[in-house]
Amino acid sequence: MEYFLTEQQKTIKGLARRIAEEKILPVRAELDETEEFPWAVIKDLADSDMFRVFIPEEYEGLGGGCFELCLVIEELSRVCSGIAVSYAASALGCLTLLEYGTEAQKQKYLPDIASGKRLTAFALTESTAGSDASAIKTTAERVEGGYVINGTKQFITNGGEAEIYTVIVLTDKTRGARGASTFLVEKGTPGFSFGKKERKMGIRASSTRELIFRNCLVPDENMIGKQGMGFIMTMKLLDRSRPGIGAQAVGLAQGALEAAVDYSRQRIQFGHPLISLPVVQDILADMATRVEAARALVYAAARTVDSGAKNFTEESAMAKVFASDTAMKVTTDAVQICGGAGYMKDYPVEKMMRDAKITQIYEGSNQVLRNAIAIELRKRKARRE
Amino acid sequence: MNIVVCLKQVPGTTKVEIDPQTNTLVRQGIKNIINPFDTYALEEGVRIKERYGVKVTVISMGPPQAEEMLREAISTGADEAILLSDSTFAGADTLATAYTLARAIHKLGQGDIIICGRQTIDGDTGQVAPELAEMLGIPFVAYVSQIEEIANGYMRVQRMVEDGHEVIETPLPAVITVVKGINAPRLPSLRGITRSKSASIPVWTAQELGVDKSMTGLSGSATRVIKVFFPQRVRRGEILQGELESQLESLIDKLRDAKLI
């Protein structure tokens, strides 16, 4: 399919693919097994300027948008979405800063993020607040010279490894979602520590940890945006980031499709390669069609985000939902085609199937996002559009 | 301080075919790559640059298409690239190659550390770097596995020897060859690729280098490739005939004759 990529976009995609094949492929199975954070690959990504892709030029970035970020995530996920998500989470962790930060905040943090010297993370989820994100309980109390944060964040990607955390807290408990604010908290701040590292079904090379705040004092200048705007900024930010999860799912599905095609060309049963059997052709054709449809939707959504449109909740939700459901279906089919071999850890597709599941869950479960799409449909009808 | 890294473009394949008429490599349809050993030399040059803030210049003697490789070198961190290309350079052996490279380094004016790969994967001689040092009249250290320190006109390196490492101190300028274990070569960077696309890569011809043409290319080569061939595969199997017992007896005799039993 022709997606009319610019020269720069082709370069980004091509280099991301080279990194994935030369640096990630040799280590992905081992990192999946050991659950070790992929620092060596992060360094390779940084050396190749991949963290500059989503940072504006005035802060030592390359000035790309959601679309360029998606191209990198897709290519990395084609080989290992556990490593891809560690990269993508660093983009998520600085999106609020990029959109709503002051000049001083951006000057202070963005150049180090662009160079890959410091990773970031985004912290919203708590034990009582998943899909119902407004139910967070972590508080920030106003004191002389700043705010004191108390509470625990859960399931935080890049937790423990990142240096800069974007944390959503309540500055006014009585106002619910309207009482939320966003703070930047640096690793090493007194009162900020890390809880247990989670053991996961998939994306095991990525780090997922609790963030624990006990009387953690952060200065006033670490607040991003206005007090009370935390929740609204977060919802808008997630609309921006969701095509990235879609890209992760597309990359994963593409990797699984290629593995299934390779296997079915080599595997001989009934005297023929599997790929010459109509039942297998049927599955492969559907897989390929679904992957391409998901890619087209994700690219279109990412371009909508970059177009300067005001509201793209629906588009980005559709891209994430469709692509993640595609990844789950396609990776499951890939295991089916590879049969007993596909179920074994010696082949990559079982990992891809485990990795796919999370894309239906995080950054808005597909159920919550379908709900959001339906609300937009209803609103539009009410506006008689 | 200036670093010069010498690179060679080689066929990117292990299935080399030889044209039986000309005894040269069949290059058609084969993608060219940077000689893998040279990628360690380039990476080491870029690391020295990052450590000491020096300039890295890459040079290569080769046909015009070697420019593509030089651009890739710029995209991975080299500052400048120069291609030494002239029809009279063709067919050079190690002596003529070293002479041409030496003239280029002389023309560059300064090269404090000249880094080469330990050998190429096509010629496999490993002779160009020592010959180059000889022609430049400067010290040479082969098989460097670590650069420990560069200071005050000296460099301390570790070099691999058969059963361990030697630590060697050499005055600069000097020529070194590096081994595979010295580093893990990086991939290009996006900013590097952008820079490499617009970089101008000068081509130095025989005239610009002011070389003595009787010392370059085929005419300057002290050696000639007379014949290139694949060793004949000889399988001398023997099938024993007759009754089983007599076969066994003759087998035992043969094994005894061969002193295998």
Image (cartoon, coloured by chain):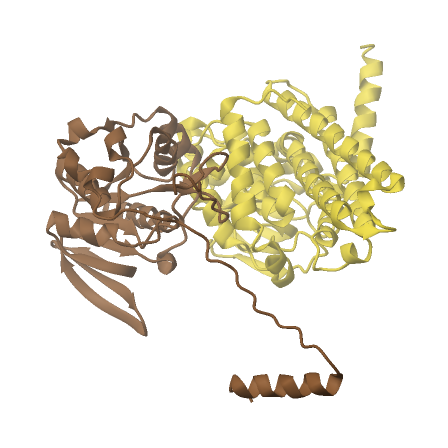
Tell me where residue A324 appears, x and y as whole percent: 75, 38
- The image shows residue B261, relative to residue B143, as above or below, that is below
Chain B is which colour? brown
Tell me where residue A258 appears, x and y as whole percent: 70, 42
Residue B219 placement, left or right of A176 = left
- The image shows residue A15, relative to residue A64, as above or below, that is below
Q: Residue at x 47, y 56 (%)?
A: A190
- The image shows residue A108, relative to residue B150, as above or below, that is above
Q: Residue furthest front?
A: B242
The answer to which quarter of the image holds residue A59 is top left
Note the chain letter of the yellow one: A
Q: Residue at x 33, y 53 (%)?
A: B119
Q: Is residue A230 visible?
A: yes
Q: Nearer the viewer, residue B152 or A204?
A: B152
Quadrant occupied by the C terminus of chain A: top right
Residue A21 placement, left or right of B135 = right
Q: How many marks?
A: 0
Tell me where residue A215 appears, x and y as whole percent: 54, 55
Q: Is residue A181 visible?
A: no
Residue A26 placement, left or right of B132 = right
Quadrant occupied by the N terminus of chain A: top right
The answer to which quarter of the image holds residue B219 is top left
Q: Residue at x 75, y 40 (%)?
A: A327
Tell me where residue B212 appears, x and y as whole percent: 13, 35
The answer to which quarter of the image holds residue B179 is bottom left
Residue A82 placement, left or right of A42 = right
Q: Nearer the viewer, residue A349 or A301?
A: A349
